[in-house]
Amino acid sequence: MIPEVGIYRDVPFRDYCEWEAVNSSSLGPMAISPAHYKHQLATPREDTDAFRLGRFIHSAKLEPSSLLNDYAVVPDNLYDDVVCADGSKPSNPKSTKQGKEKHAAWVKSIGERQIVDPTWLTQMQDMLAAINCNPRASMWLNHNGPAEVSYVWDDPDTGIRCKARCDKLDPGARIITDIKTTASVEDFTTSIGKFAYHRQAAFYCRGMDLLDPKPGEWFKFVFVAVSKVQPYLCHAAPLDDDSLSGGRQLVSEALQRIAECRTSNDWPGPPEPKSWRAPAWSMPEVTLTINGKEVTL
């Protein structure tokens, strides 16, 4: 499905994923090589517990009314009447034949809803409490702007159709807010570099600036980082202009490379080295005598 250019509200995440357009996460593999990008398109991303927890926290904060429709928690009493042949209670009712049958029947009864571990409920409540206790996070996430906004645009430099889905949009203040679950809010700057979140921010702003232009006023990008381990903490701040500028350059380079590879239908891997070289940390120290002094290299 190739969507029309525009801003969309109330689009289910599953439908958004089916839209055939370049998104921010696909630019990461392109930064490695075109071959990695092409492989990523043909290989669905593994849906890990980290991704599932992130979506759960997003839904709880931004679309709480959708929780009952999208998620299901294993009932505490699901295995209460599971017994052994002699009438005793098994030590692990889930592993018994009767327990497995009960679990299978319950999974069938919930349809397409995602199964949530009961421990996630407590974790979610603690993480939301941390967000709500942060004045700036509350301000940016609780304003009247829409949540989970999907939008589509054509890149003016390459003609590539792009898509994005922002957590919270404030068109009046021209702010895009994004919730990130992280292991450490105090080290979130490292995560920005490691996962190229500044590239994502620039990509999101690029699209909204094109769809909702206002001369001299560009969209800003705000990160609300909340730790997913105890102690549950939240830090909220905008991405600075230098980082956003660097992200724009990364976006432009990636889109230009995609356009070139589409034209040539050539998707090469990373450049081959002229020779292999052992990393410096694996090499032995060398001591030289220079002007009568020993110098260790």
Image (spheres, rainbow, N blue to C red):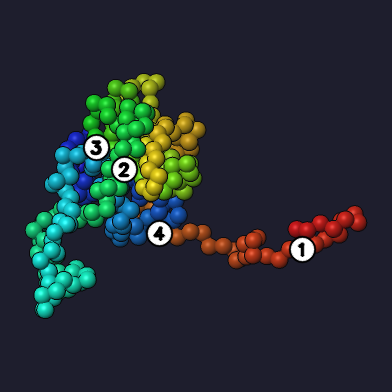
Name the residue type under label 2.
Asp
At a point 60% along the width and 66% down the height, the residue shown is 276
Q: Which residue is mark 2?
A: 126
Front-most of residues 210 and 96: 96
- Callout 3 touching callout 2 (CB < 8 Å): no
Residue 116 seen by the camera = yes
Q: Which residue is mark 3?
A: 62
Name the residue type under label 3.
Leu
Q: Which residue is mark 4?
A: 35
Q: Is residue 292 left or right of residue 147?
A: right
Give the foreground label among 3 and 1. Answer: 3
Marks 2/4: CA distance?
Answer: 41 Å
- Callout 2 touching callout 4 (CB < 8 Å): no
Dot 1 or dot 2, earlier in sequence = 2
Tell me where residue 3 sits by quadrant: top left
Give the foreground label among 1 and 4. Answer: 1
Marks 3/4: CA distance?
Answer: 36 Å
* 54 vs 206: above or below: below
Dot 1 or dot 4, earlier in sequence = 4
Dot 3 or dot 1, earlier in sequence = 3
Q: Which residue is mark 1?
A: 286
Give the foreground label among 3 and 4. Answer: 3
* 10 Å crowding of disc 1: few (<14), some (14-19), many (20+): few
Marks 1/2: CA distance?
Answer: 54 Å
Dot label at residue 163 = none
